[in-house]
Amino acid sequence: MKSGLPLLTCGKTFAPDLPEQLDRSEPPITIAEVFVDSKSIQTPCVLTKYSEFIQFTLFGLNPKLRICYRLIRVGVRDAQILQEWEFLYDATDRVGFGNINAIQPTVLNNCDCLKKGRRKLVYHIQIIEIETNGVRSYRLQNQSFTATAITGESQHERKGAR
Amino acid sequence: MRKKRPSVVKSYKPVPNVKSEEQRYVNPFIACGKVFNPVLPFELSQDDRPVPLTRVSITVKSSLPTNVLINFSCFITSALREAGAFNNLVFRLVRECSSMKVPLREYSFQRQLPSPTDIKEPLVYNFCDENPPMRTCTYTLFLVKANVSKSSFYDITNKSMTGLVFPAPIKREDERI
């Protein structure tokens, strides 16, 4: 029986050493994944929440940090790109103004209502492109990736219908 | 000494024509919002027509009290092309329940830097709406003000809005009494 109650799954995150450059033709770097099985939920929707802090130190002329991410959903038979997004800091300046130290909070949510037959899924967050210039150091910290599987419809609850 | 219960304590009564067997509990659910992609104006003042960015409609099929958690997220591009250039934006969250419009909150975004810089950064707003007045309500996030310095520009991408509906905790009499 479908209990209809929402499910929260905590995902895994990875903090590999990130390269100074990454091209789209190279294999993407997976930084988070979460598994969802929504079979107990009627008309399920999956709300994925990814958050991280990008810590970076820039120096010199024309410092630049650009990171491209994507969220993909992998089913039994297929995989689909749900969203791509980009973090950019690009100071094209003739005069440098010393070191820039920053810790940038980043949050990306995605709401994904599932078609019939899609029950067991894995969501991945990947880095697909990196461009740096004058970046002394940068890393991802305090990553978190969760999935809430929950119904997309308001429904009456009958007593004893378990 | 407290003589009376505070007047803010509400009591909820079940709708009479519903069998008492039903609707003991409202299941949590989610509503994914719609995203609009309008051409964003270079200048927008409070007197201009607000630009809708995202909208989510929520219908609760139960008379029990619910709380609604609205989440909005996006990325903001600020292309600041001169020293001291700025990008100032104001957003407004509006709730509409059968043509009764209530502005719930205004959010300001400001970016100003000493040298020319391009930034693309994320923005997240959460709003918890405690027991909205009707069973069907629509929440819209508008851009209501944009003020960007000369030769600079801005953009708003990766917009997303969701509404999560949860049963509201039962309000008891003031526990301090």
Image (tube, coloured by chain):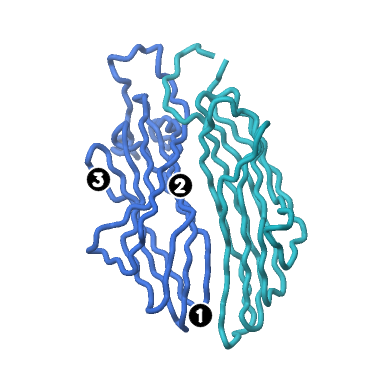
On the image, which quarter does residue B84 sit in? Answer: bottom left
In the image: residue A94, left or right of residue B145 = right
Q: In terms of secondary structure, where does tag 1 sit?
A: loop
Residue A74, image quadrant? top right
Q: Colour of chain B?
A: blue
Residue A27: mark in rendering: none
**For the residue marked with disc 3, what is the amino acid?**
Lys
Q: Amino acid at mark 1?
A: Pro
N-terminal-most mark, 1 or 3: 3
Q: Mark 2, chain letter?
A: B
Is the residue at mark 1 from the same chain as the one at mark 3? yes
Q: Are marks 3 and 2 on the same chain?
A: yes
Which of A26 and A9 lies nearest the eye of the viewer? A26
Q: Secondary structure at mark 3?
A: strand
Q: CA distance from mark 1 to mark 2?
A: 32 Å
Residue B54 lies, in percent from the top left, at 39, 49
Disc 1 sits on a residue from what chain? B
Instruction: Please name the residue that numbered disc 2 is placed on.
Output: B71
Residue B101's tag is: 3
